[in-house]
Amino acid sequence: MIQDAVELLLFVICILLSAFFSSSEVALISITRAKARTLVNEGQSGSKAVAALKESPEHLLITILIGNTIANIAAASIATAIAIQMFGDIGVGIATGFVVIVLLVFGEIGPKIYAARASDSFALTVAPVILFLSRIFTPVIWLVERISPKFGIGKEIAEPAVTEEEIKEWIDVGKEDGTIEQGEQDMLYSVLEFADTTAREIMTPRVDVIAMEDTVTFEEAIRIFNETGFSRIPVYHDQIDNITGILNVKDVFSAMVSRRKDSVIKEIMYDPMFVPETKKIDDLLKELQVHRVQMAIVLDEYSSFVGTVTVEDILEEIVGDIMDEYDKEEPEVQNISEGVFIVDAQMWVEDINERMEIDLPVDESYETIGGLIIGRLGHIPLHPGEKVEINEGKITLVVMQMHGRRIVKVKIVIHPIKEDNTS
């Protein structure tokens, strides 16, 4: 009788150990190394053990698998012995079915659900025990690590602990749960995409750049600054492709006070900073900070002037548009009526597709909606009103406004799908 009670007690202990290792696996695996460091910084009890285990995830997993395997095998053996004593040879089948059900419910499913709901607190509780067992199982762990590669087991290429896509998923979950606002979500996404953005994507294109020749007088320069509202303007010699400097309005005022008014601006302009259009804007921002300048001149692969980038342009990629008293706020996409939109011709086709949920064709030969129209027409529009049909007439693009040879505004007409009533 006492022997039966002891065997029953050992069986219960094995089930509890199986539950312990199963729940520990869920709790400890779900915690990232970044979270472990946060717990250490907060001074949480058991956090150092968690951090130590996360430094060697293979050791953690092997330790849990060893403990779980021993507990499950022991539980099955004890249950079989008890069943054979009670039912004879048929007890083997009874013990197998009973142990499977008990281990699934009380050794696997139940403990893992509990650990998933309270992963942080549970991980802090069990981490010291698992760390202690990992040291006891060191010889076995060493043997497994030596044998595994011979069978092609193990990671050959180290994978990042946290990927950018996972971070975006966390941001989306935070937005759905209400812990992250829409503006915060947009800013976090912008930060993640910051390092992948090039100068070409954010620059002010050459056709929109206000520049002045190096022969203009201070009075003419002040007039240009006053009309544009800019504080810095590129300066060129003979032709706009030949940018020779950057002029700051403060330098003009200072020179007008201390020098003769008939002087020219090339005497006070500072040397421009040239960057390739493929340069990543995170590196560009660092260079602008090092050189203590606010504007860079963007060149293409043929060293031709294609645009300008300012510190403000770079910061706007993270925080959104920064409006000052000279900026005229006008939405890039205006909904005129149902299925009719007016857009900025300089908007990228990919951005329009994303914002309007349409499917305009994307090609390497163009980037903007204006470029798409020129590509389909085969020539630069001669006047507003020229249009092209896209996607078999489902979408019409109409040139609404031009400045010289440049398209300024485009009307997008999305035609409703006609239902075929014929049967």
Image: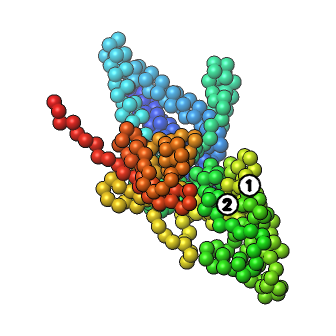
Q: Nearer the viewer, residue 60 or 364?
A: 364
The amino acid type found where label 1 is placed reads Val
Callout 2 secondary element: strand
Q: State which tag comes first along the sequence, 2 or 1.
A: 1
Residue at position x 73%, y 52% from top?
304
Q: Is residue 345 visible?
A: no
Residue at (17% x, 36% y) in the render: 421
Label 2 and label 1: CA atoms lie apart by 9 Å
In front: 166, or 7?
166
Q: Is residue 137 above or below residue 374?
A: above
**Crowd around label 1: few <14 · some 14–19 · many ≥20 (10 Å):** many
**Residue picked out by circle 1:** 275
Checking the image for residue 78, the label placed there is none
Give the answer, above or below, for where 111 lies relative to 193. above
| Count of numbered labels shown in the rendering | 2
Instruction: Please state if 72 lies on the left or on the right of 271 as rendered.
Output: left
- Left or right: where does residue 352 sit relative to residue 63? left
Q: Quadrant of residue 54?
A: top right
Which of the two residues, 193 or 164, is positioned nearer the viewer here?
193
Amino acid type of the residue tagged 2 in the rendering: Thr
Place residue 110 in its image quadrant.
top left
* Residue 161 percent across, percent down from the top left: 60, 42
Q: Give the labeled residue for mark 2.
A: 308
Residue furthest to the front in view is 382
